[in-house]
Structure formats: structure tokens, C-alpha cells
Amino acid sequence: MNFNFPPKDHVLWYTKQSEMKPCTQNLSIEVAIIGGGIAGLSAAQEFAKQGKKVALFEQYFCGSGATGKSSGFVTPNAELSLTDFAQKFNLDVAHQIWDLISSGVTNISNNIIQNKLNCDFQIQDAFVLAAKKSDTATFTKEHENLHKIGYESKLHDQHSIQSIVNSNQYFGALQYFNSFSFNPFLYCQELKQMLQSQGVLIFEQTPITKISNHHLTTPHATITADIIVVCTDHNFAELQLLKDDVFHAQTFVMASEQLQEDQIKNIFLNKNIMAWDTQLIYNYFRISKDNRLILGGGDIFTSYAHQETHNYARITKKLCNYFEQKFPKLNIQFEYQWPGLIGISKDIAPMIGRDQKHPHIYCVAASTGIATAAALGVYSAQHITQGRSDLDEYFSAYRKFPIGGIIQKIIGKRLSFILSNIIKLNIP
């Protein structure tokens, strides 16, 4: 790997932006959605399908947050596996949750295919790669659980995975189907334009600075809404919502120069897959539609940083060293590197539900995964318009967490989340 030329601190995806329209006049609306990422746009689409008059407000531009800075993996298994949910609840409940998250995958792919959205869509099966031999036991359990509820998966041993991933450094893998990749920023922009053509009002460059009962304050206008849905990922504290229960984790994504076919075959013998490993702070990689290596990961020093960490040479070296160890025949120059913060809860599961003091305010938070965010955006609209409540109990924003209350006030929010996530992940 080449360390002589550090990658540019720029999000590769941000190459095509349509006209941005801020809100400059007072407005009364049935449903106001705050946040123009995958959750907010999915909620807006579902509310519009239900015949509601919808306006969406985004402080920068659609896809500017966690969605648009992601690596573009779309798969049911993001931070939590089916087995994780089964251990937390039971397999029947996990089945319900998995169906919901899988519906997010289907919702996005249907949008892309049926409406011909131009966002570098490509079918890529997801592979979780065993970083150590003992990890393969968890794959066997996950494979069994998936098959019990009717989902297809495939186990690979150390020999068979080498016929797919061109490395002898992994001890096996679990292959998930019903997965794909895309350019997440372009998807948000394309979906934005589609929704606007259907009558949904979308205002970018319009931060919401205050929520007071049914009123939203922006720099240039006041919005009055019957229902307010907040989908701002890790920024809830700024609106005085869930301020003790949503924090963030940071990861980094790098994008290489465009690769030749022989370079790609030194990584994947079939490039239509995406992969991540089982390390505690896991590494993930895929080939983009224009033949770039997308490589991501994090480190213990910046995972819970208070703000995005830019021009971070340590992570460049760490990720390059990782890839050079796994694929020593390669010499790749990386052109871009960018950070991103994703909202998380203390048990890593999503948080949804109505605000306890103001039931007309509904929150979608800590989705940790594009498919999950899309599914919960739709769920929020179905809850409000149709009374859907089957998953309210499991993702309640007011459930109990390992550390909170007085202890959190003493040790601080950041340390509370670190310790809670450690407990959740069963780290000794």
C-alpha cells in the first residue's frame, strides 16, 4: 500500500447535487419530518402513500449525514445479527425484527428498480469473515437460526472461502443473501427528486433550531405541524430529545483509485460480494460499481469521539496495514478518506416511539444500518397512520439500559455509552 500520498478528506459520493431549496416562509402541514437521510426520506414516502401532506426539513442536503457518509452496504445484518436479537428476546421476536429489517432492504431495492433511480446499484451478497477460528461457531448458530425462520444463508470453511475471497487469512465465513450495495448519497438525492415530483415538500439548508409543542423554528420561518417525526440520527440532544440515550460511534471509509480487473481478482474472484470481519472494531470492504475498493473501519481512540475526526493519518495506516496483511499481492493508492458518526443506543438496538411529554412527536433514532433506518422510517408512518405497534415494546426509546440515571451523571455520557456497549458486546 502507498503511504506517500494521503487520501483527500472528501466524501467520494458527494459528486452530484441537485438544486437545494431552503424554507423561507411560514408553513402549516400535517406531517413534518426532520432529517433527510434514509429514515426521513423513507418516512416521507410512506406518509405520502397514506395520503398525508408532508414536508421534510434537512439542515444541509439530503444524504449529508450518516446515510450519505456510509459505505453503501445494504444488508439485514448490520450491527446486530439474528442471533443477537434471539439472545436478547427469543427467536420468535427475532423473526419479527428480521422481517422488518429485511423489508428495509426490499423497500430500497424496489425504489431503485421500479423507479430507475441512478445510484450505482449492484447486487452483492454479504459475507462475514471469521478473523479467528473460534468465530466460526457463531456462524453455525446464526446459520441454523436463519434457516429456522426461513431465510437462506451459506456456511463456508477456510478452504471454500478462499475460492471467493482471495486470502488465506480468514477461517471461514457466513454468506447472507438479499443484500446489495449502492451510492447512498445519490440514492437520497434521487429519492428526494422523486418525492418532490409526487408533491412532498423537501427543504434543504433548513435546520430546525427548536421544537415547541407543534411549532418548529427555522432560521427564516416557523412551521406548524400536526405530527412531527424526528429522524436526525445522532443529533437528538440538540433538539432536547433522548439527550441521555443517544450518542454516536465513529467509523472511517476510504476509497481507492479505480482498479484493474486483475487487481480486483486479487481481492475477490467474483466482485459481486461485500465483506466484513469479526474483529471487535470490524473492518469492511467491497468493490464499487466503478471498480474502486471501498474499505472501512475504526479504532479504539476515535470510536466515541465527540466530533468527526478529519485527516486522521493513524486510521489510514491501520486500514492499509490490515489490507496489506490480508491481500499482500496488492499495491493500491487510496484517493479519498472520510469520517462519519452514526447514532447508537446503549444496547446498540434502534430506538423508536412517541415522546413521553409530547405524543405528537415521534422519534426514529440509533438505527445503525441503512436497511434498519429505511424500515423504521416506514414503520413510523404506519404506526401513526395505521396504529402499527408490533415492535414498539422491543425498540422503545424508554427501555432500561445497563448504565444510566445517577451513574451516567457521575461518569459522563461518553463513558456511559462505552461501558454499556462493552457490556452489550460481552467483552471481558
Image: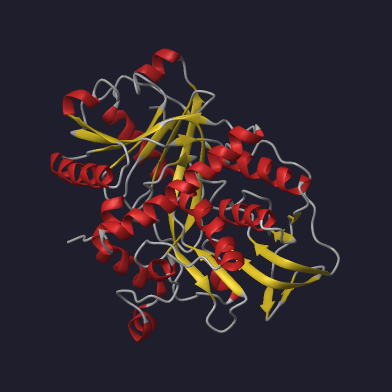
Residue at image position (14%, 39%) is 133
Please tell me whether residue 230 is drawn above or below residue 41 in the rendered image.
Answer: below
> From this viewpoint, which residue is outermost toward the right?
25
235 and 331: which is toward the camera: 235
Residue 382 in view (yes/no): yes
186 and 301: which is toward the camera: 186
Position of residue 420 measured from the top left corner of the image (x, y, whole percent): 31, 69
Quadrant holding the C terminus = bottom left
Position of residue 271 measured from the top left corner of the image (x, y, whole percent): 41, 23
Please tell me whether residue 330 is drawn above or below residue 151 in the rendered image.
Answer: above
The answer to which quarter of the image holds residue 223 is bottom right
User: Viewed as shown, does residue 183 lie left or right of 147?
Assistant: right
> From this viewpoint, which residue is outermost toward the bottom?
406
Residue at image position (26%, 44%) is 278
Please tell me whether residue 302 is drawn above or below residue 163 in the rendered image.
Answer: below
289 and 260: which is toward the camera: 289
28 and 150: which is toward the camera: 150
Position of residue 423 measured from the top left corner of the image (x, y, whole percent): 25, 66
User: Viewed as shown, does residue 79 lie left or right of 388?
Assistant: left
> From this viewpoint, which residue is outermost toward the front?
386
Please tell me whether residue 207 is drawn above or below residue 2 in the rendered image.
Answer: below
Residue at image position (62%, 34%) is 114
What is the image's colouring? secondary structure
Position of residue 232 measured from the top left corner of the image (x, y, whole percent): 58, 62
Quadrant holding the N terminus = top left
Instruction: Count the marks.
Output: 0
Residue at image position (73%, 55%) is 204
Residue 9 in view (yes/no): no
